[in-house]
Amino acid sequence: MAIEIFCRKEQKYLISKEQYNRLIEEMGNRMRSDKNGDNGKYTVTSLYFENEAKQIYFETKNKLQYRQKLRLRVYGDTDLAGTAFFEVKQKHKDVVNKRRAVIPLAEAYRYLKEGSKGGLDHFHVSNRQVLKEIDYFINYYGLQPEMIVSYDRHALHGVDDEDLRITFDFNLRCRNQDLHLEHGTYGDPFIDLNLVVLEVKVDHSVPLWLVRILQSLDCEQRSASKFCTSTELLDGELFPLETEFENTTIGGN
């Protein structure tokens, strides 16, 4: 059964492909490939939601202490019968909470079309309570499908620490036309194709051995919002990279 509730800390880095290759080499046998995909490599495609006032964008851009996003996500190639994940991602300070419900893609589209006027009990979903939270979120903000963000991911887990997860995201692209997840991962690049978004995800703190490797390779921790950057590109308001990736520390906390 897919995990439906997450609570963890996430640290983001923007690194070069050379740093990525060095990291893989330096981490050696401390990390193993994720069980999904081909040696932990797969595509991620997410449909994000927003309202006319772009509240979700401004809450994220202004780094409110509490902020949240809604997305419908699939992994790899899919069709209407494929599995999708309806997710509410909440962030309070440095702690990320994610609640998600597993749902057939066609059923997710049916919910988006019909809404909850006839109740939620007739939708085929793994966690009806999460769907109720999603429904409240959509109605409270007046959300509509806004854009699709896709990327190629390489995911790793700690060998001795299962709670340690590292992901590398490549070839980040977005589109605000053809908002059908089953139509593939195409879109316009919104981050330099030579750069990689690295995320270190832990329950408590980053292990010291990993901090030392990140420091030795000059990996700078930066806030990196795929949602904000792609919104600015698609709206024709692309700002300099530094406004979106703010330097904070080197090698984590």
Image (tube, grey):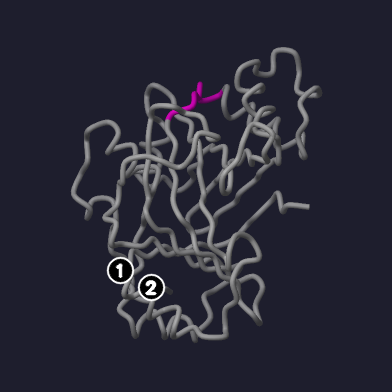
Q: Quadrant of residue 218?
A: bottom left
The spot of residue 175 in percent (x, y) is 37, 35
Q: Is residue 94 left or right of residue 40?
A: left
Please report the bounds of the magenta region as a residue range: 140-146
What is the secondary structure assignment of the residue under circle 1? strand
Amino acid on which the number 1 mark rests in the picture: Ser
Q: Position of residue 237 (x, y in %)?
A: 22, 35
Find residue 99 and report its horizontal and vertical position in percent.
65, 45
Location of the C terminus by quadrant is bottom left
In the image, residue 119 sits, relative to residue 145, either above or below, namely: above
Residue that mark 1 sits on: 16
The residue at the point 57 percent across, 65 percent down is 40
Asked whether the beta carbons under mark 1 and mark 2 sit within 8 Å of each other, the answer is yes
Q: Is residue 52 left or right of residue 162?
A: left
Residue picked out by circle 2: 20
Between marks 1 and 2, how big is the CA–CA gap?
Answer: 6 Å
Pick whichever, 34 or 140, lies toward us.
34
Residue placed at 42% from the left, 64% from the top? 198
Residue 87 location (% of width, % of height): 60, 41
Q: SS of the residue at dot 2?
A: helix
User: Residue 74 lies in what quarter of the image?
Assistant: top right
- Is 145 magenta? The answer is yes
Left or right: residue 81 versus residue 74 is right
Q: Residues within 10 Å of mark 1 (few under 14, many from 20)?
A: some
